[in-house]
Amino acid sequence: MTGATLSHLDAAGNATMVDVSGKATTLREAVAKGRITMRRTTLDMILSGTAPKGDVLATARIAGIMAAKKTSDLIPLCHPLALSSVKVDLAPVADDTGIEITARVRTTGPTGVEMEALTAVCVAGLTLYDMCKAVDRDMEIGQICLHHKSGGASGLYERTAPPSR
Amino acid sequence: MTGATLSHLDAAGNATMVDVSGKATTLREAVAKGRITMRRTTLDMILSGTAPKGDVLATARIAGIMAAKKTSDLIPLCHPLALSSVKVDLAPVADDTGIEITARVRTTGPTGVEMEALTAVCVAGLTLYDMCKAVDRDMEIGQICLHHKSGGASGLYERTAPPSR
Amino acid sequence: MTGATLSHLDAAGNATMVDVSGKATTLREAVAKGRITMRRTTLDMILSGTAPKGDVLATARIAGIMAAKKTSDLIPLCHPLALSSVKVDLAPVADDTGIEITARVRTTGPTGVEMEALTAVCVAGLTLYDMCKAVDRDMEIGQICLHHKSGGASGLYERTAPPSR
Amino acid sequence: MTGATLSHLDAAGNATMVDVSGKATTLREAVAKGRITMRRTTLDMILSGTAPKGDVLATARIAGIMAAKKTSDLIPLCHPLALSSVKVDLAPVADDTGIEITARVRTTGPTGVEMEALTAVCVAGLTLYDMCKAVDRDMEIGQICLHHKSGGASGLYERTAPPSR
Amino acid sequence: MTGATLSHLDAAGNATMVDVSGKATTLREAVAKGRITMRRTTLDMILSGTAPKGDVLATARIAGIMAAKKTSDLIPLCHPLALSSVKVDLAPVADDTGIEITARVRTTGPTGVEMEALTAVCVAGLTLYDMCKAVDRDMEIGQICLHHKSGGASGLYERTAPPSR
Amino acid sequence: MTGATLSHLDAAGNATMVDVSGKATTLREAVAKGRITMRRTTLDMILSGTAPKGDVLATARIAGIMAAKKTSDLIPLCHPLALSSVKVDLAPVADDTGIEITARVRTTGPTGVEMEALTAVCVAGLTLYDMCKAVDRDMEIGQICLHHKSGGASGLYERTAPPSR
C-alpha cells in the first residue's frame, strides 16, 4: 500500500464522506468477530436453565442485528446502505472464559459492509455487558476485528494476524 | 454477590427493563477505557501533520460523544437518561501500538452511566477503524472495560483486575 | 404452505435477518388498513370546524408517513428499504364509530413493503389516540391487517378473510 | 367532560405540544393491551419447540420495549420522557386464536405514559406479524386499548368498556 | 464578556460536552425566528384554498416540533433534554415575500433551549422548501436568530440587533 | 412553470410522499450554501490558534455530514436515499463577518438531493451557533439556498438570483 492515504480526509485534511458514485454495485460480504470475557459464574448464569439463556442471548443477538442497521447513523463518514442480510452468532469460547460474537453482513451495493459487521459485534457485546453487569462489573470486551471481506474492487481479505497482538 | 441474579430477566427468564422508579436521583459518574491497536505506520499517519490529525481524532471524539447520547436506543434494556456531561479523550498508547480511548460520563439521575461510557468508547474506536481501514484492515479494538463508577446505592467501583485477562 | 417454517429463525431457532441478496429487484406494493373506534362526540370534534380538522388528520397522516420510513428501525428483522411512495388516507367509517386508516406503500427493491404499510397504519392510529385522549380514553385501535400485496416471487395477495375474525 | 376540547390544538386549530411545565412530577403508570390473531397452525409454530419459541417471543418483547423508548420520536406531539420501567408480556389467548400483548410502563415525570404503553403493544404486534408473515398473511392486530392509568392530576383510570366495541 | 472562551472546547481545544451537573434545574424558555422568502405566486399557492393550506403549513409545523425533540441527536455537543412545551407558528411576512417561522420552547432543566428553538425554525423552513421546490427553486431561508431567552444563571436575553446585519 | 402545483399534496390537498417509482435512477448532485454571521471577535476566536480551530470547524463539518444522512428522518415527505457522497466546506466570508457553509451531495437514485444539501448547511450552521453561543448570542444564520442541481428529468439548475433578495 505504498502511498496510501487516509481516504476520509480531503487534501486539506478535512473529514469527508468518500465519493462512491463511481464504484460498482456488487455483492459484498464481511465477517467480524469479538468476545466478552467474564467470570465463570457469570457465564454459567447465562448458559444454565433454558428460559434465561434464551432471553440473554436473544436480546444480544437482536441488539447486534439492529445496530448493524444503524451503522451509518453512528459512524460519521459511513455511507447509508440497504443491507440484504445480517446474522449474529453467540457461542461460549472454548475455555469457558466468555462468549464469542460473530457477525456476518451482506449487501448488494457500492461499498463494503465491514463497519456494519464490526458495529453489530460491539453492540451485541455491550448488550451482554448490560445484562450481566449487576453480577460482574469486571467483564471486558475485546478482540474485535475483521475476519473476512469479499466483493468490490479491493478483492478478498482474510485475516491472518493472530488476535490480541 | 451470593445469590446474585441477572437483573434484566424476570422470574420467567424474560427480558425486562429494570424498574428504577424507587431509586434515588443522585450524581453518578462512570469512566470506561478501550484501545484500538494498529500498525506503526497507520498511527503515524494519524498523528503526523496538523490538519489530518485534527480531523481524524476530532471525528472519533465527536462520534463517541454522540453515541453516548444514543445508548438507550442501542442497548435494548438501558434506561433513557439526561446526560449532564460526556468527555472522550484519545491518546497514543505508550508503546505506539495504537490509540487509547477514555470516556467519562456524568448524570444526575436514578441509574448509572457505565453503559453510556462503554458505548462512547466502542463507537469512537469503530470510527477510528473506519477512517483508517483503507490503509490497515488488521486493526483490532479491545480492552474495553469499566474503570470507575460512583454514585448510587451500589457505591464506588474502581477496576483492579488487569486488562486482557 | 406445507412444510412452511418461520423465515426469521435459523436452524437453531435463533432470530436472523433473512438473506435477500438473491431476490429480484422489482416494483412492489402493499396496502394495509386499520381503524380507531371512538365516541361519536370525539369523532365530531375531529371532523367539525375546518382548522382543527386540518391539523388532527394532517398530524396523523404525517406521523404515519414518517413511521413508514422508520420501519426497519422499529421491527428488528426488517430490511432497510428505499421507499418510492407512501400514502396515508384517513376517513370516517360508515357508521361514524371512528376513523379508518389506509396506507399504501411502494418500493423498487428485493423485499416487500407490507411491514411499512402496517407500521404506517399503527402509528397514524396511535397519533389520533394521542390527540384525542384528553377527551376519550376508551378509544380502541384494531382491525389492522394487510389487504393487498403485489410484486416479488410470492405473487399477488388480496385479503379475503373478513376482518375481526 | 363537558366543554372538553382537543388538548393538542391551539385556539387557531394548529397542532401544538401541550405545555406541561406547570404539572407535578409524580410516579405515573400505564397498562395497555392488544392482540394478534392468527391461524392455529401459526400459533403452534411459535409455541412448539423451545429454541424457536424463545426467539420469536423474545424478539417481539424486545421490540416492544425498545419502541416504548422511541414513542416521542414517533408520535409528533408526545413529550420526551425518562422512562423508569417497561415490561412487555406475551401469552397465548384463551381460545388459542393468537397472542395477547400487555405492556406496563412507569415514569416519574410531569406527563402520563399511556402512549408509551400503547406504542409498545403495537410494535410488539407488528414484530410478531413480521416473523410469521411467511406462513400466514391473514393475521390481524387489534383490540389495542388502555386498561389502566394512574398518577397525575387526572387520577385513576381503569377501563370498563368491553373490547372490540 | 472579557475573557470569554468557547465553552465547548477543553483546555487542549478538544470538543467536549459542557458539564451541567452543577447547574440549577429551573424553568427555561427560548424563542427563535426565521423566514423563508419565495415568489409571490408560490406564497399564493400555499395560502389559497383551504385544504392545501392546511397541509403545507401543518406539515411544516409538525416537522418543526418533531425536530426540536431531535436537537441533541443533530447537534453534537447539545445535552439531551425533556422538553415541556414546543410551539411553532407560521405566518406570511408583512410584504408577502414569504413566511415567518417562530418557535417557542420551554423546559424545566439545567440548560437552556435556544438550540431546540433554532432547530425547530430551521427544519420547519426546510420542510416548506421541500413542499414548494417543484414550483420555486429560488427560495431562500434566512434571518434565523434567537429573539428571547429566559431562565438559568445567564439571565434574560432579548435580541436588540436588527436582523440581517 | 404554468399550471405548476405543489407536488406533495394530492388532489384533496393532503400531504403525500410523491411516487418516484417511475423515475430513472441516475447520478444526481446538489450544492447548497448558507452562512452564519457573527461578531469579529467571535470569528477570531474560531480561527485563531490551531487546536481550537480544528475542533470547532471539524465538529460543524461532521454534524453537517451526519445531518445529510438524516434528512428523510427530519423532512416528512422526503424519500430515504442511499447517498454516495457528502462534502461540507467551511470558510470565513470575504469581509470577516462570519463563516460560509457549502454542502455538496451526490447520489445515484430516482430523486434529487437538494434537501440533503440544504439540511447539511442548516445543521452545520446550528452547530457553529451552539459552539459559540456562550460568547455571542446575536449570531444569525441565513442566505440558505440551492446553488446547483444536476441529474434527473428536470435538468440542470444554476442559481442566478442574488442572495438575500
Image (cartoon, coloured by chain):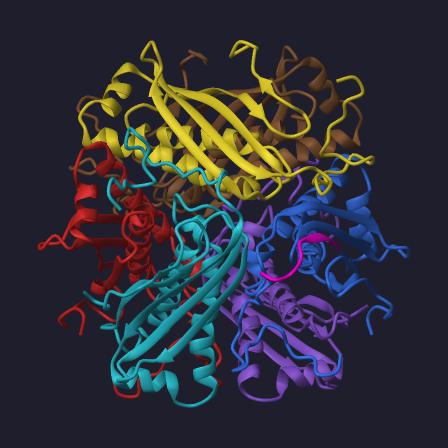
Chain colours: A blue, B purple, C yellow, D brown, E red, F cyan
E58, C10: nearer the viewer = E58
Q: Residue furthest left?
A: E94
Total marks placed? 0
Q: Nearer the viewer, residue B160 or C71?
A: C71
Residue A45: x and y, percent?
A: 78, 46
Image quadrant where one finds the N terminus of chain D: top left
For the C terminus of chain D, which image quadrant?
top left
User: Which x, y percent locates residue A48?
Assistant: 82, 41
D29 in relation to E122, above or below? above
In the rendered image, residue D157 lying in the magenta stretch gets the answer no
Give the image location of residue F30, x and y in percent: 42, 61
Quadrant of residue B98 within the rendered picture: bottom right
Magenta stretch bounds: A21-29
Q: Is residue A37 in view from this perspective?
A: no
Q: Quadrant of residue D25?
A: top left
Q: Is residue D72 above or below residue C117?
A: below
Is C102 displayed left or right of D141 in the figure? left
Is C84 situated above or below D126? below
Q: As drawn, is D35 to the left or to the right of E16?
A: right
Residue B117: x and y in percent read 58, 64
Residue F163 seen by the camera: yes
Looking at the image, residue E121 sits to the left or right of residue B124; the answer is left
Q: At 43% from the left edge and 45% from the top edge, which residue is drawn?
A: D73
